[in-house]
């Protein structure tokens, strides 16, 4: 057997030792060391990346899911820091819901991954070249690249041991997760108007904060557009204070 074949056999055995035999001539005790080392490293990265999800899934179900991930998901990155992203892709594309797992598992995992992704993102807000004191109405507010506007069926930011919803909310949950200039990750509860505001500010057609707010007033058919503009200015100022908006350009 060639070295390449031995390595492939060893890798397959380590991922799935119960169903794939190890290479001939290798002492089982030594194989067990590799099995345990590999599994514990992968499981530890996933558990640390998704601590709330881990706390809500019992040990047997959790380890069965991690093992299934190792057996069936083909990772496309060699970096340990990106294991969480690979696990999220597994949950979204390969993992079918089963009894014993939370119905909100995919959304909660995405929310937890977003926090990690923003924490390790390379962008540096010190490189912002706009005007942090600019007029938020007459100029165009610039949304931070480290601010992600998200919508979920479940209130993922509230989920924990004491609160585990069994069905989606009546209305979507809108959140803005961001990293500020002090490199602290936080979140802001939002609504559909704020989510639409951030979406329009990042569109190619946007030219000013006022124009965006007037468009929103038209979209929701508000009888007093200037009330929308005035209320929107308050929202813009709050977003600016949180570094979700960095200034104007």
Image (spheres, helix red, strand yellow):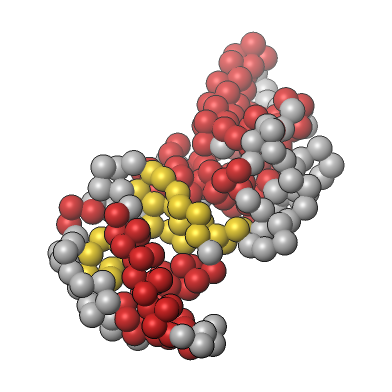
Q: Position of residue 135 (x, y in %)?
A: 20, 72
Front-most of residues 9 and 77: 77
Q: Is residue 211 above or below residue 84?
A: below
Camera-nearest residue between 53 and 161 = 161
Establish if 161 lies above or below 148.
above
Q: In which quarter of the image is the C terminus?
A: bottom left
Residue 157 placement (x, y as % from top left)? 57, 46
Residue at image coords 38%, 78%: 229
Q: Which residue is most to the right?
A: 99
On the picture, is 238 further left or further right than 101? left
Residue 26 visible in the shown view = no
Residue appearing at x 70%, y 48% in the figure? 104
Which quadrant of the figure has residue 27?
A: top right
Vertical arrangement, residue 64 with respect to residue 158, above or below: above
Q: So how many labels did they put on this image? A: 0
Q: What residue is shown at x 22% (from left), y 77% (from top)? A: 139
Residue 198 image position (x, y, % from top left): 41, 69
User: Which quadrant of the structure image shows residue 17?
Assistant: top right
Residue 134 visible in this rendered orientation of the protein = yes
Nearest the eye: 221 or 103: 221
The quadrant of the image that shows the N terminus is top right
Residue at the (63%, 51%) spot, across then down: 155
Q: Would you place residue 62 above or below residue 243 in this image?
A: above
The image shows residue 32 at horizontal and vertical percentages of 64, 17
């Amino acid at each position: 057997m060639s070295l390449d074949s031995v390595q492939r056999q060893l890798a397959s055995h380590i991922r799935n030792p119960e169903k794939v035999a190890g290479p001939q001539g290798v002492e089982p005790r030594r194989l067990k060391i590799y099995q345990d080392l590999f599994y514990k490293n992968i499981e530890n990265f996933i558990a640390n990346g998704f601590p709330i999800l881990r706390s809500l899934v019992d040990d047997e179900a959790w380890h069965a899911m991690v093992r299934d991930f190792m057996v069936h998901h083909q990772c496309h990155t060699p970096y340990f820091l990106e294991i969480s992203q690979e696990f999220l892709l597994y949950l979204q594309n390969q993992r079918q819901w089963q009894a014993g797992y939370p119905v909100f598992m995919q959304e909660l995992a995405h929310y937890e991954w977003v926090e990690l992704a923003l924490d390790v993102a390379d962008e540096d807000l010190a490189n912002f070249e706009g005007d942090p004191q600019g007029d938020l109405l007459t100029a165009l507010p610039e949304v931070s690249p480290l601010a992600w506007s998200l919508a979920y069926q479940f209130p993922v930011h509230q989920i924990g041991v004491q609160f585990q919803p069994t069905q989606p909310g009546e209305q979507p949950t809108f959140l803005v997760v961001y990293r500020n200039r002090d490199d602290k990750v936080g979140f802001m509860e939002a609504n559909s108007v704020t989510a639409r505001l951030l979406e329009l500010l990042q569109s190619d057609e946007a030219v000013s904060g006022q124009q965006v707010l007037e468009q929103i007033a038209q979209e929701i058919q508000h009888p007093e557009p200037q009330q929308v503009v005035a209320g929107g200015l308050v929202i813009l100022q709050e977003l600016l204070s949180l570094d979700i908006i960095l200034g104007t350009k």
